[in-house]
Image (spheres, coloured by chain):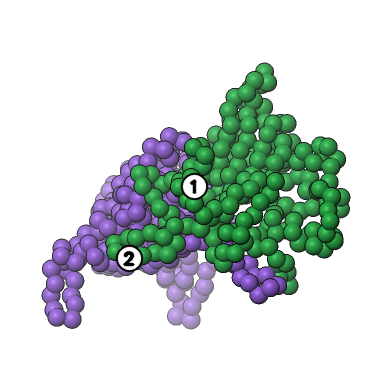
């Protein structure tokens, strides 16, 4: 269920980050570990889990003509070769992958007697980690859930395609009570941007 | 993680800084609302450090810092900057008193302890002119999010290395003692790969093979120019190799050039150990003949790794 509260929708300025989870299985099909990454610039702590900062981007979600978003390409930094090593030593395919979007308002911060409304570089303590559990004003929703379909790796990047369960089941987005235009707008708002309105496209 | 604060900040005279903070984008809506979304909130800084009038030993120290850390992150804490006497309206002010207030360019160490003052090299270019034999140049640093905390360091290790590709061929040195360049640029060709988050370097991976590169500038009379072009014709193209003195010209500590007091053997003996195996970087050689009969030209030379 995608829930965007008024907190996020109403804010004129907010911070957004994504959490990525990939389940890894051993080649004998036993569970190995869950890899947790974030596209934020420091570690993110959420639900007591540590998410490692990584240069990770994903294509814009879009619907196809059946009104379903069936797959998405993710590009992950592989400069240290750790991921390709992991990918070759375990089974990625057909395992759970998810992208979680988190929208929050950075806390204010007092540095040297000066108040910074949205902090200067996230509130940091012992090492650079953003503790999302401590931030009250946030919205969390699953942007994309599915399974890893294929991946390719080069020296500097690893590309993966993840596919929704919708696609596997040939199932479209839920049936609707509003008209087509409205629906597109709402889906775009969820996928793309935060404010629940029509984005200016010209 | 290596700390290069003292090495890099000792002889500089100028900073050129660009600081990014709260990087993100603004999205306008048809309703007239504009929503601003922050994606990266750690401040990122690109820092150009300029040097002027640096002598050979000082340059060598900077160069050693670069060569040993060309593809890894390192610490430079700008708040540790060497104190400089500061003058304000009322006259002389003790430097140490104001130092802390005045040199606080990078706020990251304040926020995240000194373990956050982490950088990576982006560029390293110096120029020496043959008259003064002093170096001027510029080092560009970019901030890194690969901080000096075990949580980051445990992810993977970073190293850098450089070793000179030694040559014993003195043919080009002999040409240089005749056809002396009036200036030489000293740079590097780096083939390591970097990944970034926002404007910050996340990780640098050393693939080895850091190469020195030179650009030499000449203004020569015809007989000397003919020696140079003859050498180029012999050694040109991708296959030509020769020994290149590491400072681009003959030994900068021997200041005899102006008086034409050069004992070739003496110069050569001084530099033999430091010749790099190199080649011309271009397959062509451009030069101009001026109305006064002088020839003006430039050549790019690149180290060849064995």
Q: Name the residue: 55% across, 34% down.
A: A82
Q: Which chain is purple?
A: B
Q: x%, y% of residue B197?
A: 52, 51
| Vertical order, B64 against A168 (above or below) | below
Q: For mark 2, name the chain.
A: A
Q: Could you tell me how far apart the alpha carbons at marks 2 and 1 are, in whole angstroms?
A: 24 Å
Q: x%, y% of residue A60?
A: 70, 54
Q: Name the residue: 58% across, 28% down.
A: A33
Q: Quadrant of the N terminus of chain B?
A: top left
Q: x%, y% of residue B199?
A: 50, 57
From the viewer's side, name the closer residue of B284 and B47. Answer: B47
Q: Is residue B197 visible?
A: no
Q: Which chain is green?
A: A
Q: Is residue A153 visible?
A: yes
Residue B85 quadrant: bottom left
Residue A11 quadrant: bottom right
Q: Which mark is residue A114?
A: 2
The residue tagged 1 is A132
**SS of the residue at dot 1?**
helix
Classify residue B187 as left or right of residue A64. Answer: left
Badge 2: how crowded within 10 Å, few (<14), some, or many (20+)?
Answer: few
From the viewer's side, name the closer residue of A13 and B52. Answer: A13
The residue lying furthest to the top in this view is A28
- Of callouts 2 and 1, the N-terminal one: 2
Q: Name the residue: 45% across, 47% down.
A: A134
Badge 1: how crowded within 10 Å, few (<14), some, or many (20+)?
Answer: some
Classify residue B219 as left or right of residue B28. Answer: left
Q: For mark 1, name the chain.
A: A
Q: Name the residue: 48% across, 68% down.
A: B297
From the viewer's side, name the closer residue of B207 and A146. Answer: A146
């Amino acid at each position: 269920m995608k829930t965007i509260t008024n907190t996020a929708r109403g804010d004129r300025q907010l911070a957004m980050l994504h959490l990525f989870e990939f389940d890894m299985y051993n080649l004998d099909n036993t569970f190995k570990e869950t890899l947790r990454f974030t596209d934020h610039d420091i570690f993110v702590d959420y639900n007591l889990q540590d998410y490692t900062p990584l240069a990770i981007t994903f294509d814009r979600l879009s619907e196809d003509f059946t009104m379903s978003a069936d797959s998405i390409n993710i590009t992950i930094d592989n400069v240290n070769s750790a991921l390709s090593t992991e990918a070759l030593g375990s089974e990625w395919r057909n395992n759970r992958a998810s992208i979680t979007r988190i929208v929050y308002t950075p806390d204010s911060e007092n540095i040297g007697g000066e108040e910074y409304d949205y902090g200067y570089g996230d509130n940091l303590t012992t090492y650079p980690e953003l503790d999302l559990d401590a931030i009250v004003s946030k919205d969390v929703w699953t942007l994309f859930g599915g399974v890893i379909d294929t991946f390719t790796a080069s020296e500097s990047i690893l590309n993966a395609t993840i596919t929704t369960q919708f696609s596997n089941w040939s199932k479209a987005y839920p049936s609707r009570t509003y008209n087509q235009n409205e629906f597109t707008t709402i889906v775009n708002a969820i996928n793309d941007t935060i404010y629940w309105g029509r984005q200016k496209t010209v | 993680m290596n700390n290069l604060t003292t090495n890099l900040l000792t002889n500089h005279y100028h900073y050129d800084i660009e600081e990014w903070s709260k990087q993100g984008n603004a999205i306008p809506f048809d309703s007239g609302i504009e929503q601003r979304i922050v994606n990266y909130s750690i401040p990122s800084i690109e820092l150009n450090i300029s040097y002027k009038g640096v002598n050979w030993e000082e340059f060598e120290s900077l160069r050693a810092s670069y060569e040993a850390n060309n593809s890894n992150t390192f610490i430079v804490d700008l708040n540790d900057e060497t104190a400089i006497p500061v003058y304000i309206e009322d006259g002389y002010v003790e430097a140490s008193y104001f130092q802390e207030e005045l040199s606080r360019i990078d706020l990251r160490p304040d926020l995240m302890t000194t373990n956050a003052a982490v950088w990576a090299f982006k560029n390293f270019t110096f120029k020496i002119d043959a008259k003064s034999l002093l170096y001027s140049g510029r080092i560009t640093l970019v901030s890194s999010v690969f901080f000096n905390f075990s949580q980051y360091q445990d992810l993977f290790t970073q190293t850098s290395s450089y070793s000179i590709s030694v040559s014993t061929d003195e043919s080009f040195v002999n040409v240089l003692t005749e056809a002396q360049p009036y200036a030489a640029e000293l740079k590097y060709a780096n083939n390591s790969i970097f990944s970034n988050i926002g404007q910050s370097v996340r990780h640098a991976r050393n693939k080895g093979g850091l190469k020195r590169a030179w650009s030499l500038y000449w203004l020569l009379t015809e007989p000397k120019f003919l020696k140079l072009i003859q050498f180029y014709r012999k050694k040109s193209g991708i296959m030509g190799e020769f020994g290149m003195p590491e400072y681009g010209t003959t030994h900068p500590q021997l200041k005899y050039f102006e008086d034409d007091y050069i004992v070739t053997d003496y110069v050569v003996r001084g530099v033999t150990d430091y010749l790099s195996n190199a080649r011309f970087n271009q397959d062509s050689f451009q030069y101009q003949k001026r109305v006064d009969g002088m020839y003006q030209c430039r050549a790019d030379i690149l180290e060849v790794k064995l």
